[in-house]
Image (spheres, rainbow, N blue to C red):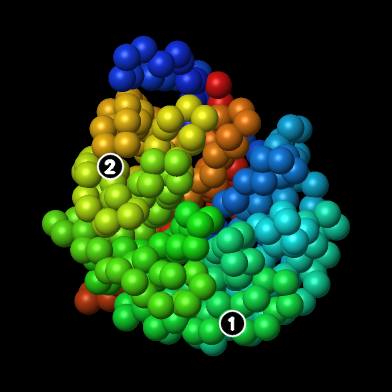
Amino acid sequence: MKTPLPFLALVLGACVMTAISIHAAPGEKIPLPGNSGWDYLSVDSAARRLYVTHGDRVHVVNLDTDTAVGEIAPIDGAHGVALAPDLGRGFVSNGKTGFITVFDLKTLGILALWQTAGKKPDAVLYDPATRQLFSFNGESENATVFDAVTGGLAGTVKLGGGPEFAATDAAGHVFVNIEDNDETLRLDARSLAVTARWPLAPAHAPSALAIDRAHHRLFVGCRSQTLVVLNSDTGAIVATLPIGKGVDAATYDAVRGLVLVSNSDGTLNVFHQTDADHYTATETLATAPGARTHAVDPKTGRVFLASAQFEAAPPSAPGQPKVRPAIKPGSFGVLVLKP
């Protein structure tokens, strides 16, 4: 990959008719130690904390001071973080070993390790309606469901394909992208049954997923450079929008009526929601190559993207997959796009 471009700050202007004005200004970066790869970020706005998965640990950043305040470690291949404020605990998927690390939200101390019934747990989701934790296991094409209070196994759900990101409506339904089948599934969080399979064609390879609970809409970021907006009650496609290459995260900012999509090509697509079925592309912001995952703080509207600089990629052998470039030591951190 190329050297990261200068990243920009996001300034949210007043809503005028159907558009939101966004202005660019110099941003900032929160440096974090370690040279491993990374995956998802999660925000706990009430507690003013940002969680950043990073190889063998999860960094915890104070959202008011932009400083690291602790780590959750060791983690064997950190992918996702799910937060259960009502239980005072959080959960981290260990992609290499198949465990879920349970930690205390106040002390960050590790409380337990739960074994999933699957391989390569990736996205993890806490459903407050049922107080259950869902671990979506990429290589097993299933989900392991735990009682988040006791740690007991509630069940295993066969998904029929490799799951990617997931979302909950907090009313008894869980949604998950099935990347290799080009569909989004709806699960009954209580019976653990798959109740609907919604095709996304002609879009394919769904990765990112966010939800607008008030308007019953799902935002599905697909690697075919398409954002698909679904009705979360019926599965009907209500809008499709062009996005950048290599999407891996989407968020819905209900306070400002924005849908944000981050891509590995170093872009952040910003869409304004006019109403449940109409969206306007307001800006495509330059971030940094590889900054494919992000989280938003609903209190301030600031956007946080994990990123690093990369060495030149070594040549690939004929007929072999492209070799990933190494991360430059000391370059990892979180880009901040701010008002």
Does 299 sit above or below residue 73? above
Residue at left offset 26%, top offset 57%: 235
Label 2, residues with CA under 10 Å away: few <14, some 14-19, many ≥20: many
- Direction from residue 272 to residue 299 in the image, left or right: right
Pick whichever, 99 or 1, lies toward us. Answer: 99
- Direction from residue 93 to residue 74 in the image, left or right: right
Q: Which residue is mark 1?
A: 154
Pick whichever, 39 or 140, lies toward us. Answer: 140
SS of the residue at dot 1?
A: strand
Q: Residue furthest left?
A: 202
Q: Nearer the viewer, mark 1 or mark 2?
A: 1
Residue at left offset 70%, top offset 62%: 90
Pick whichever, 107 or 128, lies toward us. Answer: 128
Residue at left offset 51%, top offset 45%: 294
Give amino acid for label 2.
Answer: Ile
Res 150 visible: yes
Q: Residue furthest bottom?
A: 117
Residue at left offset 45%, top offset 46%: 213
Does 189 sit above or below residue 115? above
- Direction from residue 312 to residue 223 in the image, left or right: left
Q: Position of residue 186 (x, y in %)?
A: 37, 66
Q: Quadrant of residue 103?
A: bottom right
Does 215 sit above or below residue 271? below
Q: Is tag 1's residue or tag 2's residue first in the polypeptide sequence?
A: 1
Q: Dots 1 and 2: beta carbons under 8 Å? A: no
Q: Which image quarter is the C terminus in?
A: top right
SS of the residue at dot 2?
A: loop
Q: Position of residue 79 (x, y in %)?
A: 55, 65
Q: Which residue is mark 2?
A: 243
Pick whichever, 109 or 151, lies toward us. Answer: 151
Q: Position of residue 209 (x, y in %)?
A: 40, 54
